[in-house]
Amino acid sequence: MRKILGTLAAALAVSLGSAKGQTITPGNGQHSAVLPSATLNVFTYRPGACTPGRLLLVFHGVGRDAGPYRDRSRTLADTVCAIAIVAEFDSERFPTEQYQRGGSTIALVPQLVGWAEKRPASPACRTS
């Protein structure tokens, strides 16, 4: 149940805007996202069989294990032709009150989307 909630229920798809900057290449990746309010370790997955037109934001659980959440979201990302983005919210900077209980980390979500929108190479989704 935790896997389902962590991967599917906490996933949010948003449309990609225009592409600028460094791209997220197909397959698994790991990046340092420098946001206005924080720098986050971000695990990514980009499908290789289509040109993604969406972002799939996945939020890890209390174990703070962003990498495995990215890995479990690959099938969904392939199915909907989306780039999976899983930011790691470490417990030192983002304690339970800030992360799990809807604290100030909610303000980082639009910043994370803005960071990701500048990375993809094409906003049009095309399945093969």
Image (cartoon, rainbow, N blue to C red):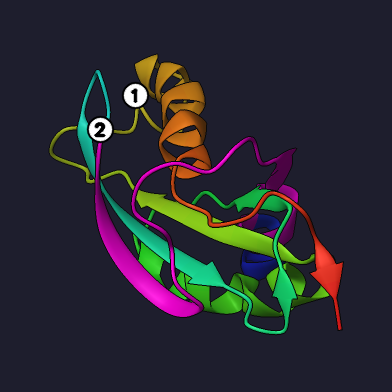
Establish if 81 lies above or below 59.
below
Establish if 85 lies above or below 81.
above
Q: Which residues are magenta?
A: 6-34
Point 40% across, 36% down: residue: 115
Q: Is residue 16 magenta?
A: yes
Point 38% across, 24% down: residue: 105
> How many neighbours does mark 1 have within 10 angstroms: few (below 14), some (14-19), or many (20 or more)?
some
Question: Which quadrant is home to the N terminus?
Answer: bottom right
Q: Amino acid at mark 1?
A: Gln
The answer to whether the residue labelled 2 contacts the one labelled 1, judged by CB atoms less than 8 Å apart, is yes
x and y percent of residue 61 in the render? 47, 53
Establish if 3 lies above or below 42.
below
Q: Amino acid at mark 2?
A: Phe
Residue 11: mark? none
Q: Is residue 67 left or right of residue 8?
A: left
Q: Kindly indicate the quadrant of the structure image that contains residue 30.
A: bottom left
> How many neighbours does mark 2 have within 10 angstroms: few (below 14), some (14-19), or many (20 or more)?
some
Q: Kindly indicate the quadrant of the structure image that contains residue 2.
A: bottom right
Q: Which residue is mark 2?
A: 94
Question: Which quadrant is home to the C terminus?
Answer: bottom right
- Of the pair 76 and 26, the residue shown nearer to us: 26
Establish if 103 lies above or below 67.
above
- Of the pair 93 and 45, the residue shown nearer to us: 45
The answer to whether residue 61 is visible is: no
**Residue extending furthest toward the left:** 92
Point 35% across, 23% down: residue: 97
Q: Kindly indicate the quadrant of the structure image that contains residue 74.
A: bottom right
Q: Is residue 11 magenta?
A: yes
Q: Is residue 19 left or right of residue 1?
A: left
The answer to whether residue 48 is visible is: yes
x and y percent of residue 109 in the render? 49, 28
Q: Which residue is mark 1?
A: 98
